[in-house]
Image: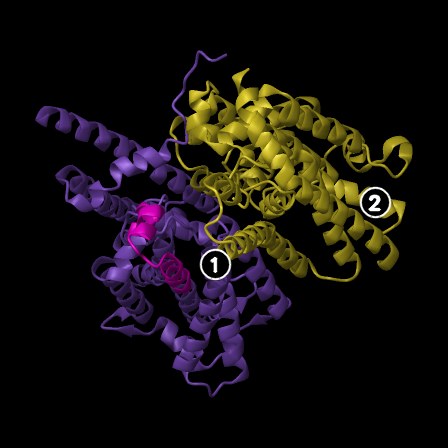
Chain colours: A yellow, B purple
Amino acid sequence: MSADVIAAPAERRSWSRFATWDVAVIVVAAIVIVVAAVGVEHFGTTRNFGFLILEMAPILVLALPLTLIIVTGEIDLSVASMVGLTSASMGAMWDAGLPLETILWVTVLIGAVLGAVNGFFVTVLGLPSLAVTIGTLALYRGLAFVLLGDTAVADFPRPFTNWAIGGIGGEWIPNVTIPILVLVALFTAVLHATSVGRSTYAIGANPVAAAFAGIPVGKVKFWLYVLSGAVAGLVGVYWTLRFSSARADNANGLELTVVAAVLLGGVSIFGGKGTLPGVVGGVVLLTALQNALRLSGRSADQLTIVTGVLLIISVLAPNIVSSARAALTRRRRARVPISHDPVSLSDARKDPS
Amino acid sequence: MTTVSPQPSGAPTDSVHEVDPGTRTGSTVLDAVLRFRALGLALVLVALVIVTTLANSRFLSQQSIRDVLLSASIITLLATGVTMVVLTKGIDLSVGSVLGLSAFITAQTLAENPGLPIPVAGLIGVGVGLACGLINGAVVAWGKVPPLVATLGTLYVFRGVVYTVAGGSRINAGDMPRGFLDFGTARIFGVPWLFVIAGVVLLVVALFLGRYRSGRDLYAIGSNPEAARLAGIPITRRLMTAYLASGALAGMGGVLYAARFGTVDASAGSGLELDVVAAVVVGGVAIFGGSGTVLGAGLGALVLTVINSALPVLGANPFWQRAIVGALIVGAIALDRLVAARVAVSLRKKGSHVG
């Protein structure tokens, strides 16, 4: 319960500061879609919108738990490798002759275990999440290759693969839209309206203070990693069925896009700040931009450059803005000499930080 | 719900401070641990070589030793640069892409200008690396972007640039001048030139980090950035130096890569950053900055290369390579943490005896 009390001021601050960023990202995403619909051939068709949702699905779903993890001040770089390994295990289990209904559950469970391994190293051993998840990025991808080598398992039953790419009632809106909307709603509710969700902000703002306030910091972080793994397992299932192919290199390098989308959505890499609507905006902006660029004939390599640059800009831009604002305040303060009473001086100092 | 009061896992900062000063106060316990790390690595190395040689005596043949040394040279160069960055609490994930960009541009320049003197080609490669390092350094030191985000971004940006420049083409050995390729395999007193170069660079950087003020500053920044700033250390300039050095060494690695393999396409050095990070942390460089040596990182690179070349000899599935790299990264930092915790406990005990 105390979580709410602790998180409240942080929440107000984060809203007033990032409301503009969140809204801006959503507005820019809308502008990109409108401009592309007008200017880029084939972009504005329902067929392409259906494709866009299929394309967006893994990024959006992976971004949900990653947002919570980054809000607590940690990171998970292994998400794409977990997708690869769960996809590879799905292929291996199918090859071994297990029924697909069982495989789906086991795959998600495997994902949760992989996430728990990350969580164990980060919370029980207290290792830096950056280093741990760089390590498991290599480890999980490597294990995926150990399982499948460079072969692909492709003979998944038609009804399942058709569902993954099919539309609701045979129309253009993909079947996956409904589970995605449910997941987004669930995560948004948890992050913004429950004490556990609010406690992630307190942890990100100051883990020591959060622990003293009675928040089980380690436990929260551990389960967030488990969640991240389980969700990666879901995405592994989706990826495998969508492309009807379990391969060790599935989703290779996707962590860049996911991290870029989350940071673009206004989540602070330093923790403690960010909202899920903003992240959804970031994901839509990034995938719509990539889709529009691809349709207008840009190569995949140029898309990677754009994504990488956007990742850096999403952190660089707020830094530049805040340091410019600080410089402005400094100059303003210098212009008005000592006549300030201490109260208003400290107010002025608080403003830019 | 407030009954549990767990150890905040933000605790790393605390324990780092507990451990870190010891590395320089000459505490005998920590000295022993640090020496043990190098000794332990050397033992692992010897054991690996013995086991593999027992399985296949050709593992100790001159040719195979030379191959290991050549591969280790390139990783050592990159690990040396990344060590400088990691010492400052940073990380450079872009080195694999920088190597690829430098290797491709060097090879292309040589293919288009066969008369170009080789040292000039080398300088072009290093220049490419410096330019990349400048971008990383500017974003991190001036833009205050966390090194992870900055170099994860440039990892893909630089790789995208290589693909755009190369556009699916490939520079073959036949396109490059003979002299350049010979340099890639040439030896002096039986030792490959590349290994000599990597060794010299390693020693120079070791000297810089150990004996020069600006080198020691990198440790100070990594141990406690705020204290370093208060002590008057020009942090921005030092960070810039570290990222420039990392870029330049990755660029040099690219030149050596082109000379050694003769064939360069846009994917050269893909994923190499993971091997390099593994070499650095296995070599005992603390991932939270402020502690470690380039000699350790060099030893780490050698161990990693030996493992890689021992795998096929031992008949293991070569796909294990990447998984082992990952396990080594996690294992090394976990080991560091456990050792640090033990040392902290023993120091506390020692303190209580005195008090």
On screen, residue B68 above or below A285: below
Q: Nearer the viewer, residue B317 or B240?
A: B240
Q: Nearer the viewer, residue B140 or A104?
A: B140
Q: Residue at x 28, y 61 (%)?
A: B214
Which element is circle 2 on?
helix
Left or right of residue B220, residue B126 in this image: right
Q: Residue at x 30, y 48 (%)?
A: B283
Q: Residue at x 31, y 57 (%)?
A: B233
Magenta residues? B220-244
Amino acid type at image mark 1: Trp
Q: Which residue is mark 1?
A: B142
Q: Nearer the viewer, residue A167 or B242?
A: B242
Q: Which residue is mark 2?
A: A49
Left or right of residue A50, residue A289 in this image: left
Q: Chain of mark 2?
A: A
User: Which corner quadrant of the image does residue A155 belong to?
Assistant: top right
Question: Does residue A243 appear anywhere in the picture?
Answer: no
In magenta stretch: residue B226:
yes
In magenta stretch: residue A158:
no
Residue B5 is situated, as x and y percent measured from the top left of the image, at 41, 17
* Furthest residue in direction bottom, as rendered: B115
CA gap, disc 1 and disc 2: 40 Å
Q: Nearer the viewer, residue B209 or B202?
A: B209
